[in-house]
Amino acid sequence: MEAKVCVVGAGPAGLSVARALRRLGLDYDQYERHGDVGGIWDLDNPGTPMYESAHFISSRGTSGFFDFPMPETFPDYPGNRQILAYTRDFAAAYGLYDGIRFNTAVTDVERQGDAWIVTLDDGTRHTYGAVICATGVTWTPRLPRHSGHFTGEVRHSNTYRANTEFRGKRVLIVGLGNSGADIACDAAANADAAFVSVRRGYHVIPKHVFGIPTDEFAERGPHLPLVLERPLFTALLRLLQGDLTRYGLPKPDHRLFESHPLLNSQLVHHLQHGDVAIKPDVAGFDGSRVRFTDGSSEEIDLVLHATGYDWTIPYAERHFRWRDGRPDLYLTAFSRTRRNLFGLGYLETNSSAYTLFDHISDLVARYLHDQRHAPDRAEAFDRLIATDRTALTGGISFVDSARHRSYVDARSYRRHLAEVRERVGWRGLEPGMFDAVRGAASERQGTR
Protein backbone atom coordinates (compact mmCIF):
# COMPACT_ATOMS: atom_id res chain seq x y z
CA MET A 1 0.00 0.00 0.00
CA GLU A 2 1.30 3.44 -0.92
CA ALA A 3 2.11 5.60 2.08
CA LYS A 4 0.24 8.78 1.18
CA VAL A 5 -3.44 9.61 1.41
CA CYS A 6 -5.15 12.01 -1.00
CA VAL A 7 -7.81 14.35 0.46
CA VAL A 8 -9.96 16.13 -2.11
CA GLY A 9 -11.55 19.35 -0.86
CA ALA A 10 -10.75 21.80 1.95
CA GLY A 11 -14.19 22.63 3.22
CA PRO A 12 -15.24 21.68 6.77
CA ALA A 13 -15.28 17.91 6.08
CA GLY A 14 -11.88 17.95 4.37
CA LEU A 15 -10.34 19.98 7.19
CA SER A 16 -11.83 17.64 9.79
CA VAL A 17 -10.25 14.56 8.25
CA ALA A 18 -6.94 16.37 7.67
CA ARG A 19 -6.70 17.07 11.41
CA ALA A 20 -7.51 13.43 12.20
CA LEU A 21 -4.83 12.18 9.79
CA ARG A 22 -2.25 14.54 11.30
CA ARG A 23 -2.96 13.31 14.80
CA LEU A 24 -2.05 9.76 13.81
CA GLY A 25 0.95 10.79 11.72
CA LEU A 26 -0.56 9.71 8.40
CA ASP A 27 1.05 11.45 5.43
CA TYR A 28 -1.39 13.08 3.03
CA ASP A 29 -1.79 15.62 0.23
CA GLN A 30 -4.87 17.82 0.13
CA TYR A 31 -6.20 19.52 -2.98
CA GLU A 32 -8.60 22.45 -3.12
CA ARG A 33 -9.80 23.96 -6.39
CA HIS A 34 -10.46 27.35 -4.75
CA GLY A 35 -7.85 29.76 -3.35
CA ASP A 36 -8.65 29.28 0.37
CA VAL A 37 -10.41 26.95 2.80
CA GLY A 38 -14.08 27.18 3.72
CA GLY A 39 -15.96 25.37 0.97
CA ILE A 40 -19.50 26.65 0.47
CA TRP A 41 -19.14 29.25 3.24
CA ASP A 42 -16.86 31.37 1.06
CA LEU A 43 -19.04 33.68 -1.02
CA ASP A 44 -16.14 34.10 -3.46
CA ASN A 45 -15.93 30.37 -4.14
CA PRO A 46 -17.33 29.86 -7.68
CA GLY A 47 -20.54 27.84 -7.62
CA THR A 48 -21.21 28.17 -3.91
CA PRO A 49 -24.90 28.21 -2.93
CA MET A 50 -24.17 30.72 -0.16
CA TYR A 51 -25.96 34.09 0.04
CA GLU A 52 -25.31 37.17 2.15
CA SER A 53 -28.13 36.60 4.64
CA ALA A 54 -27.34 32.90 5.25
CA HIS A 55 -26.86 31.70 8.83
CA PHE A 56 -26.20 28.32 10.41
CA ILE A 57 -29.42 26.43 11.09
CA SER A 58 -27.85 24.66 14.06
CA SER A 59 -26.71 26.74 17.00
CA ARG A 60 -23.25 27.88 18.00
CA GLY A 61 -23.18 25.61 21.06
CA THR A 62 -23.87 22.38 19.17
CA SER A 63 -22.13 23.00 15.86
CA GLY A 64 -18.40 23.51 16.18
CA PHE A 65 -15.46 21.24 15.50
CA PHE A 66 -14.62 18.93 18.39
CA ASP A 67 -12.42 20.60 21.03
CA PHE A 68 -12.49 23.88 19.06
CA PRO A 69 -15.71 25.63 20.12
CA MET A 70 -17.07 28.62 18.32
CA PRO A 71 -16.30 31.93 20.09
CA GLU A 72 -18.81 32.94 22.75
CA THR A 73 -18.94 36.33 21.03
CA PHE A 74 -20.78 34.66 18.14
CA PRO A 75 -24.58 34.91 18.18
CA ASP A 76 -26.75 31.85 18.77
CA TYR A 77 -26.94 31.28 15.01
CA PRO A 78 -23.74 32.59 13.37
CA GLY A 79 -23.80 34.19 9.94
CA ASN A 80 -21.89 32.93 6.93
CA ARG A 81 -18.96 35.33 7.37
CA GLN A 82 -18.52 34.25 10.98
CA ILE A 83 -18.63 30.59 10.01
CA LEU A 84 -16.03 31.20 7.31
CA ALA A 85 -13.74 33.05 9.73
CA TYR A 86 -14.18 30.28 12.31
CA THR A 87 -13.37 27.59 9.73
CA ARG A 88 -10.22 29.42 8.65
CA ASP A 89 -9.20 29.92 12.27
CA PHE A 90 -9.56 26.17 12.75
CA ALA A 91 -7.34 25.44 9.74
CA ALA A 92 -4.71 27.90 10.96
CA ALA A 93 -4.77 26.68 14.57
CA TYR A 94 -3.94 23.11 13.56
CA GLY A 95 -1.51 24.01 10.78
CA LEU A 96 -3.74 22.53 8.09
CA TYR A 97 -2.92 25.22 5.54
CA ASP A 98 0.55 23.71 5.18
CA GLY A 99 -0.83 20.53 3.66
CA ILE A 100 -3.19 22.08 1.10
CA ARG A 101 -2.42 22.76 -2.53
CA PHE A 102 -4.82 25.55 -3.51
CA ASN A 103 -6.20 26.48 -6.95
CA THR A 104 -5.77 22.82 -7.91
CA ALA A 105 -8.69 20.63 -8.92
CA VAL A 106 -8.73 16.84 -9.08
CA THR A 107 -10.11 15.84 -12.46
CA ASP A 108 -9.92 12.04 -12.29
CA VAL A 109 -9.27 9.16 -9.93
CA GLU A 110 -8.27 5.84 -11.50
CA ARG A 111 -7.57 2.47 -9.92
CA GLN A 112 -4.18 0.86 -10.46
CA GLY A 113 -4.03 -2.41 -8.58
CA ASP A 114 -4.54 -1.56 -4.92
CA ALA A 115 -3.52 2.06 -5.42
CA TRP A 116 -5.12 5.15 -6.97
CA ILE A 117 -3.82 7.39 -9.74
CA VAL A 118 -5.06 10.94 -9.14
CA THR A 119 -4.99 13.35 -12.08
CA LEU A 120 -4.89 17.09 -11.42
CA ASP A 121 -6.09 19.91 -13.65
CA ASP A 122 -2.50 20.71 -14.61
CA GLY A 123 -2.28 17.24 -16.18
CA THR A 124 0.04 15.73 -13.58
CA ARG A 125 -0.69 12.28 -12.15
CA HIS A 126 0.09 11.14 -8.63
CA THR A 127 -0.14 7.76 -6.91
CA TYR A 128 -1.87 7.34 -3.53
CA GLY A 129 -2.73 4.52 -1.21
CA ALA A 130 -6.13 5.95 -0.33
CA VAL A 131 -8.48 8.67 -1.55
CA ILE A 132 -10.88 10.63 0.65
CA CYS A 133 -13.52 12.55 -1.33
CA ALA A 134 -14.73 15.56 0.66
CA THR A 135 -16.07 17.91 -1.97
CA GLY A 136 -19.63 18.28 -0.70
CA VAL A 137 -23.15 17.85 -2.01
CA THR A 138 -24.35 21.33 -3.01
CA TRP A 139 -22.46 22.02 -6.23
CA THR A 140 -24.79 20.52 -8.89
CA PRO A 141 -28.10 22.43 -8.84
CA ARG A 142 -31.32 20.64 -9.72
CA LEU A 143 -33.49 22.81 -11.99
CA PRO A 144 -36.97 21.48 -12.87
CA ARG A 145 -38.59 22.10 -16.23
CA HIS A 146 -42.09 23.56 -16.62
CA SER A 147 -44.36 23.65 -19.63
CA GLY A 148 -44.95 26.83 -21.56
CA HIS A 149 -42.81 29.86 -22.28
CA PHE A 150 -41.77 32.38 -19.64
CA THR A 151 -40.66 35.89 -20.58
CA GLY A 152 -39.18 36.65 -17.18
CA GLU A 153 -35.99 35.42 -15.54
CA VAL A 154 -35.55 31.82 -14.30
CA ARG A 155 -32.65 30.90 -12.06
CA HIS A 156 -31.57 28.38 -9.44
CA SER A 157 -31.02 29.62 -5.91
CA ASN A 158 -27.29 28.80 -6.13
CA THR A 159 -26.99 31.99 -8.24
CA TYR A 160 -28.61 34.15 -5.56
CA ARG A 161 -26.35 36.37 -3.43
CA ALA A 162 -28.06 39.51 -2.10
CA ASN A 163 -31.57 40.82 -1.38
CA THR A 164 -30.97 43.81 -3.67
CA GLU A 165 -31.61 41.39 -6.56
CA PHE A 166 -35.31 41.43 -5.64
CA ARG A 167 -35.96 45.15 -5.59
CA GLY A 168 -38.61 46.34 -8.02
CA LYS A 169 -39.59 42.76 -8.93
CA ARG A 170 -42.41 40.32 -8.35
CA VAL A 171 -40.60 37.19 -7.17
CA LEU A 172 -41.58 33.53 -6.97
CA ILE A 173 -39.46 31.16 -4.86
CA VAL A 174 -40.04 27.52 -5.82
CA GLY A 175 -39.34 25.18 -2.91
CA LEU A 176 -39.43 25.59 0.85
CA GLY A 177 -36.37 23.96 2.33
CA ASN A 178 -34.26 25.99 4.72
CA SER A 179 -32.58 27.96 1.93
CA GLY A 180 -35.90 28.54 0.20
CA ALA A 181 -37.41 29.84 3.43
CA ASP A 182 -34.45 32.16 4.06
CA ILE A 183 -34.55 33.55 0.53
CA ALA A 184 -38.33 33.93 0.70
CA CYS A 185 -37.82 36.15 3.76
CA ASP A 186 -35.32 38.27 1.81
CA ALA A 187 -37.87 38.58 -0.98
CA ALA A 188 -40.65 39.43 1.48
CA ALA A 189 -38.66 42.39 2.78
CA ASN A 190 -37.36 43.66 -0.58
CA ALA A 191 -39.49 42.58 -3.55
CA ASP A 192 -42.59 44.36 -4.83
CA ALA A 193 -44.41 41.07 -4.24
CA ALA A 194 -43.15 37.71 -2.97
CA PHE A 195 -44.62 34.22 -3.40
CA VAL A 196 -43.46 30.73 -2.43
CA SER A 197 -44.57 27.66 -4.36
CA VAL A 198 -44.77 24.53 -2.19
CA ARG A 199 -45.80 20.98 -3.02
CA ARG A 200 -46.21 19.72 0.53
CA GLY A 201 -46.70 21.04 4.03
CA TYR A 202 -43.85 21.42 6.50
CA HIS A 203 -43.45 21.53 10.24
CA VAL A 204 -41.90 24.95 10.82
CA ILE A 205 -39.65 24.91 13.87
CA PRO A 206 -38.69 28.21 15.54
CA LYS A 207 -35.00 28.86 16.17
CA HIS A 208 -35.58 29.44 19.88
CA VAL A 209 -37.79 27.72 22.43
CA PHE A 210 -38.21 29.68 25.67
CA GLY A 211 -35.22 31.79 24.65
CA ILE A 212 -32.93 28.78 24.14
CA PRO A 213 -31.71 27.65 20.69
CA THR A 214 -33.99 24.81 19.69
CA ASP A 215 -31.28 22.18 19.21
CA GLU A 216 -29.76 23.06 22.59
CA PHE A 217 -33.21 22.84 24.17
CA ALA A 218 -33.58 19.34 22.70
CA GLU A 219 -30.10 18.28 23.87
CA ARG A 220 -30.51 19.62 27.40
CA GLY A 221 -33.85 17.99 28.05
CA PRO A 222 -34.36 14.34 28.90
CA HIS A 223 -33.89 12.07 25.88
CA LEU A 224 -37.34 10.60 25.71
CA PRO A 225 -38.45 7.69 23.53
CA LEU A 226 -39.72 8.86 20.16
CA VAL A 227 -43.25 7.76 21.03
CA LEU A 228 -43.24 10.38 23.82
CA GLU A 229 -40.91 13.00 22.31
CA ARG A 230 -42.91 13.50 19.11
CA PRO A 231 -46.31 14.30 20.66
CA LEU A 232 -44.69 16.56 23.27
CA PHE A 233 -42.82 18.62 20.68
CA THR A 234 -45.85 18.64 18.36
CA ALA A 235 -47.99 20.05 21.17
CA LEU A 236 -45.29 22.59 22.06
CA LEU A 237 -45.10 23.84 18.47
CA ARG A 238 -48.87 24.15 18.29
CA LEU A 239 -48.82 26.14 21.53
CA LEU A 240 -46.06 28.47 20.30
CA GLN A 241 -47.22 28.96 16.70
CA GLY A 242 -50.84 27.97 16.39
CA ASP A 243 -52.25 26.50 13.19
CA LEU A 244 -49.98 27.56 10.32
CA THR A 245 -52.47 26.48 7.67
CA ARG A 246 -54.35 29.74 8.28
CA TYR A 247 -51.40 31.51 6.62
CA GLY A 248 -51.68 29.35 3.50
CA LEU A 249 -49.15 26.63 4.35
CA PRO A 250 -50.49 23.18 3.48
CA LYS A 251 -51.03 20.76 6.33
CA PRO A 252 -47.95 18.50 6.60
CA ASP A 253 -48.43 15.04 5.10
CA HIS A 254 -45.91 13.59 7.54
CA ARG A 255 -45.33 13.61 11.28
CA LEU A 256 -42.84 15.82 13.10
CA PHE A 257 -39.17 14.75 12.64
CA GLU A 258 -39.98 12.69 9.51
CA SER A 259 -38.51 15.32 7.20
CA HIS A 260 -35.50 17.62 7.31
CA PRO A 261 -36.43 20.29 9.88
CA LEU A 262 -37.55 23.64 8.49
CA LEU A 263 -35.91 25.86 11.09
CA ASN A 264 -37.09 29.42 10.59
CA SER A 265 -38.69 32.07 12.77
CA GLN A 266 -38.92 34.92 10.25
CA LEU A 267 -41.07 33.08 7.72
CA VAL A 268 -44.06 32.92 10.05
CA HIS A 269 -43.61 36.62 10.81
CA HIS A 270 -43.73 37.52 7.11
CA LEU A 271 -46.71 35.25 6.50
CA GLN A 272 -48.54 36.87 9.42
CA HIS A 273 -47.94 40.32 7.94
CA GLY A 274 -48.80 39.41 4.35
CA ASP A 275 -45.29 40.14 3.07
CA VAL A 276 -45.14 36.76 1.32
CA ALA A 277 -47.90 34.46 0.03
CA ILE A 278 -47.95 30.69 -0.30
CA LYS A 279 -48.88 29.17 -3.66
CA PRO A 280 -49.23 25.50 -4.70
CA ASP A 281 -47.04 23.68 -7.22
CA VAL A 282 -46.24 25.35 -10.53
CA ALA A 283 -48.40 24.08 -13.40
CA GLY A 284 -46.63 26.00 -16.17
CA PHE A 285 -45.62 29.32 -17.69
CA ASP A 286 -47.68 31.64 -19.85
CA GLY A 287 -45.64 34.63 -20.98
CA SER A 288 -45.09 36.82 -17.95
CA ARG A 289 -47.48 34.79 -15.81
CA VAL A 290 -46.90 31.64 -13.76
CA ARG A 291 -49.83 29.23 -13.53
CA PHE A 292 -50.36 27.09 -10.44
CA THR A 293 -52.09 23.74 -9.94
CA ASP A 294 -55.06 25.35 -8.16
CA GLY A 295 -55.89 27.28 -11.33
CA SER A 296 -54.57 30.63 -10.09
CA SER A 297 -51.78 32.59 -11.74
CA GLU A 298 -49.48 35.50 -10.90
CA GLU A 299 -47.53 38.07 -12.86
CA ILE A 300 -43.89 37.26 -12.06
CA ASP A 301 -40.56 38.86 -13.00
CA LEU A 302 -38.18 36.34 -11.40
CA VAL A 303 -38.59 32.63 -10.68
CA LEU A 304 -35.92 31.37 -8.30
CA HIS A 305 -35.78 27.60 -7.86
CA ALA A 306 -34.70 26.51 -4.37
CA THR A 307 -35.10 22.92 -5.49
CA GLY A 308 -31.98 21.29 -4.14
CA TYR A 309 -28.92 19.63 -5.61
CA ASP A 310 -27.85 16.38 -7.21
CA TRP A 311 -25.08 14.61 -5.35
CA THR A 312 -22.05 14.13 -7.55
CA ILE A 313 -18.40 13.12 -7.20
CA PRO A 314 -17.44 13.82 -10.81
CA TYR A 315 -13.78 12.86 -10.55
CA ALA A 316 -14.52 9.47 -8.94
CA GLU A 317 -18.20 8.76 -9.71
CA ARG A 318 -17.62 5.33 -11.22
CA HIS A 319 -15.81 3.98 -8.17
CA PHE A 320 -18.82 4.30 -5.85
CA ARG A 321 -22.01 2.29 -5.74
CA TRP A 322 -25.04 4.59 -6.03
CA ARG A 323 -28.59 4.19 -4.72
CA ASP A 324 -31.26 6.83 -5.28
CA GLY A 325 -28.60 9.32 -6.36
CA ARG A 326 -26.56 8.78 -3.17
CA PRO A 327 -23.28 6.90 -2.74
CA ASP A 328 -23.77 3.69 -0.75
CA LEU A 329 -21.29 4.22 2.09
CA TYR A 330 -20.98 2.40 5.39
CA LEU A 331 -21.56 4.89 8.22
CA THR A 332 -21.90 7.51 5.43
CA ALA A 333 -18.14 7.39 4.76
CA PHE A 334 -16.65 3.97 3.95
CA SER A 335 -16.81 2.32 0.52
CA ARG A 336 -18.25 -1.17 0.82
CA THR A 337 -16.04 -2.47 -2.01
CA ARG A 338 -12.73 -0.58 -1.68
CA ARG A 339 -11.03 -0.40 1.71
CA ASN A 340 -9.00 2.62 0.59
CA LEU A 341 -11.83 4.81 -0.79
CA PHE A 342 -13.93 7.16 1.33
CA GLY A 343 -16.56 9.86 0.99
CA LEU A 344 -16.77 12.36 3.82
CA GLY A 345 -19.67 14.78 4.20
CA TYR A 346 -22.11 12.82 2.03
CA LEU A 347 -24.97 12.80 4.50
CA GLU A 348 -28.16 14.60 5.41
CA THR A 349 -28.67 15.12 9.12
CA ASN A 350 -30.76 17.09 11.58
CA SER A 351 -28.02 18.57 13.78
CA SER A 352 -24.36 19.48 14.39
CA ALA A 353 -22.69 18.49 11.10
CA TYR A 354 -19.18 19.70 12.03
CA THR A 355 -19.04 17.57 15.17
CA LEU A 356 -20.35 14.58 13.22
CA PHE A 357 -17.57 15.11 10.67
CA ASP A 358 -15.03 14.84 13.50
CA HIS A 359 -16.54 11.61 14.80
CA ILE A 360 -16.44 9.91 11.40
CA SER A 361 -13.08 11.47 10.43
CA ASP A 362 -11.57 9.89 13.53
CA LEU A 363 -12.80 6.46 12.41
CA VAL A 364 -11.44 6.96 8.88
CA ALA A 365 -8.01 7.91 10.23
CA ARG A 366 -7.94 5.03 12.74
CA TYR A 367 -8.93 2.54 10.04
CA LEU A 368 -6.18 3.73 7.68
CA HIS A 369 -3.68 3.71 10.53
CA ASP A 370 -4.63 0.16 11.55
CA GLN A 371 -4.42 -1.15 8.00
CA ARG A 372 -0.69 -0.48 8.33
CA HIS A 373 -0.04 -0.97 12.04
CA ALA A 374 -2.83 -3.14 13.52
CA PRO A 375 -4.24 -5.28 10.70
CA ASP A 376 -6.35 -7.46 13.03
CA ARG A 377 -8.36 -4.42 14.13
CA ALA A 378 -8.68 -3.21 10.54
CA GLU A 379 -9.97 -6.64 9.50
CA ALA A 380 -12.52 -6.57 12.32
CA PHE A 381 -13.79 -3.31 10.89
CA ASP A 382 -13.78 -4.83 7.38
CA ARG A 383 -16.27 -7.42 8.65
CA LEU A 384 -18.54 -4.67 9.93
CA ILE A 385 -18.37 -2.85 6.59
CA ALA A 386 -19.47 -6.05 4.87
CA THR A 387 -22.27 -7.02 7.27
CA ASP A 388 -23.53 -4.04 9.31
CA ARG A 389 -26.67 -2.48 7.85
CA THR A 390 -27.90 -0.81 11.04
CA ALA A 391 -30.41 1.96 10.29
CA LEU A 392 -29.20 5.36 11.47
CA THR A 393 -32.66 6.90 11.67
CA GLY A 394 -33.34 6.55 15.39
CA GLY A 395 -36.60 4.77 14.65
CA ILE A 396 -37.93 7.72 12.63
CA SER A 397 -39.83 6.82 9.46
CA PHE A 398 -38.55 9.56 7.21
CA VAL A 399 -40.48 10.81 4.19
CA ASP A 400 -40.22 8.39 1.26
CA SER A 401 -37.89 10.35 -1.00
CA ALA A 402 -34.37 9.91 -2.36
CA ARG A 403 -33.16 12.68 -0.10
CA HIS A 404 -34.52 11.14 3.07
CA ARG A 405 -33.43 7.60 2.27
CA SER A 406 -29.87 8.78 3.03
CA TYR A 407 -30.89 10.74 6.12
CA VAL A 408 -29.35 10.09 9.53
CA ASP A 409 -30.53 11.15 12.95
CA ALA A 410 -27.54 12.83 14.61
CA ARG A 411 -28.15 11.34 18.06
CA SER A 412 -28.56 7.80 16.71
CA TYR A 413 -25.55 8.25 14.45
CA ARG A 414 -23.27 9.23 17.34
CA ARG A 415 -24.61 6.35 19.43
CA HIS A 416 -23.95 3.77 16.70
CA LEU A 417 -20.47 5.15 16.03
CA ALA A 418 -19.72 4.62 19.72
CA GLU A 419 -20.93 1.01 19.47
CA VAL A 420 -18.74 0.40 16.42
CA ARG A 421 -15.69 1.84 18.17
CA GLU A 422 -16.28 -0.42 21.15
CA ARG A 423 -16.62 -3.53 18.98
CA VAL A 424 -13.43 -2.79 17.04
CA GLY A 425 -11.40 -1.53 20.01
CA TRP A 426 -11.04 2.13 19.11
CA ARG A 427 -11.33 4.94 21.63
CA GLY A 428 -13.70 7.82 21.07
CA LEU A 429 -13.05 11.54 20.80
CA GLU A 430 -11.51 12.91 23.99
CA PRO A 431 -10.78 16.51 25.02
CA GLY A 432 -7.14 17.34 24.41
CA MET A 433 -6.52 14.57 21.88
CA PHE A 434 -5.61 17.10 19.18
CA ASP A 435 -3.43 19.29 21.42
CA ALA A 436 -0.22 17.84 19.99
CA VAL A 437 -1.33 18.74 16.46
CA ARG A 438 -2.07 22.27 17.58
CA GLY A 439 1.19 22.53 19.49
CA ALA A 440 3.21 21.38 16.48
CA ALA A 441 1.46 23.98 14.35
CA SER A 442 2.31 26.72 16.86
CA GLU A 443 5.97 25.63 16.87
CA ARG A 444 6.17 25.75 13.08
CA GLN A 445 4.61 29.19 13.01
CA GLY A 446 7.03 30.38 15.71
CA THR A 447 10.08 29.32 13.70
CA ARG A 448 9.04 31.26 10.62
Image (tube, rainbow, N blue to C red):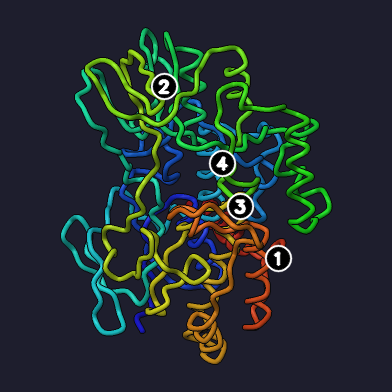
User: Measuring 64% from the left and 27% from the top, which residue is drawn there?
Assistant: 244
* Distance of label 2 from label 4 (alpha carbons): 22 Å
Q: CA distance from mark 1 to mark 3?
A: 13 Å
Tag 1: amino acid: Glu
Which numbered dot is residue 65? 3
Q: Residue furthest right?
A: 222
Position of 47 compared to 148: left or right? right
- View extreme (bottom): residue: 376
Q: How packed is label 3: few (under 14 Cα within 10 Å), some, or many (20 or more)?
A: many
Q: Quadrant of the N terminus?
A: bottom left
Q: Specify few, some or many for label 4: CA neighbours under 10 Å numbering under 14, 14-19, or 20 or more.
A: many
Find residue 216 and report its image quarter.
top right
Q: Secondary structure at mark 2?
A: loop
Is there a contact, CB below 8 Å, between mark 2 and mark 4?
no
Q: Residue furthest front?
A: 295
Per the image, label 4 sits on a secondary structure element best described as helix
Residue 358 drawn at (x, y percent): 58, 60
Quote the CA–CA distance across marks 4 and 1: 21 Å
Image vertical order of residue 405 relative to residue 170, above or below: below
Asked if 249 appears above or below 296 in the picture, the reply is below
Answer left or right for 192 relative to 127. right
| Marks 3, 2: nearer the viewer | 2
Q: Does label 2 or label 1 sit earlier along the sequence?
A: 2
Q: Secondary structure at mark 1?
A: loop
Q: Which residue is mark 2?
A: 162
The x and y percentages for residue 182 are 51, 28
Q: Can you tell which of label 2 and label 1 is closer to the viewer?
A: 2
State which mark lies toward you, 2 or 4: 2
Q: Tell me: 228 left or right of 446.
A: right
Q: Which residue is mark 1?
A: 430
Question: Which amino acid does the dot numbered 2 rest on?
Answer: Ala
